[in-house]
Image: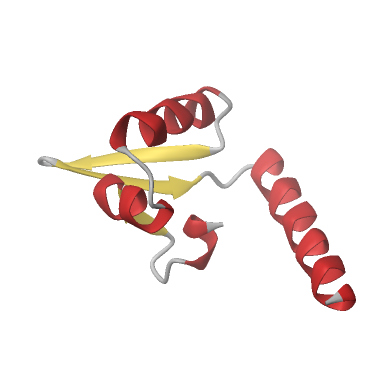
Amino acid sequence: MVLVESESKAINITALVSKLNSNYNTVMRCLNYMKKLQIIEEEVIGRLRLIKLSDNELTKQMLKLTEKIREAYNSIS
């Protein structure tokens, strides 16, 4: 959800760790798993590593499901 809500649709790993209030190792473990599933893409610019959602059918379906869950949650609260 953090990647969906970011303005540029890309975020560096340090900012992602901060937004998730987590630690680097945990975030990297999750990111590596998502890369294997082709949910995210990583772009390296010098020492900066940017993460963004992949533009594929799996990611699109996951975003639709997430939006439906959010709508259902908002309708009961």
Q: Is 64 on the left-hand or right-hand side of 15?
A: right
Q: Is residue 28 above or below residue 72?
A: above
- In which image quadrant can residue 1 be found? bottom right
Q: Is 46 on the left-hand or right-hand side of 42?
A: left
Q: Is 43 on the left-hand or right-hand side of 71?
A: left
Q: Quadrant of the C terminus?
A: bottom right
Q: What residue is at 53 percent from the left and 44 percent from the top?
A: 54
Image position, residue 16 (x, y; %): 35, 51
Q: Nearer the viewer, residue 77 or 62?
A: 77
Q: Nearer the viewer, residue 31 or 36?
A: 31
Q: What residue is at 89 percent from the left and 74 percent from the top?
A: 76
Q: What residue is at 43 percent from the left and 66 percent from the top?
A: 6
Q: How many marks?
A: 0
- In which image quadrant can residue 18 be found? bottom left
Q: Is residue 47 above or below residue 30?
A: below
Image position, residue 14 (x, y; %): 25, 48
- In which image quadrant can residue 11 be found? bottom left
Q: What residue is at 81 percent from the left and 59 percent from the top?
A: 69
Q: Nearer the viewer, residue 75 or 68?
A: 75
Is the image coloured rainbow, by chain, by secondary structure, or in one colour? secondary structure
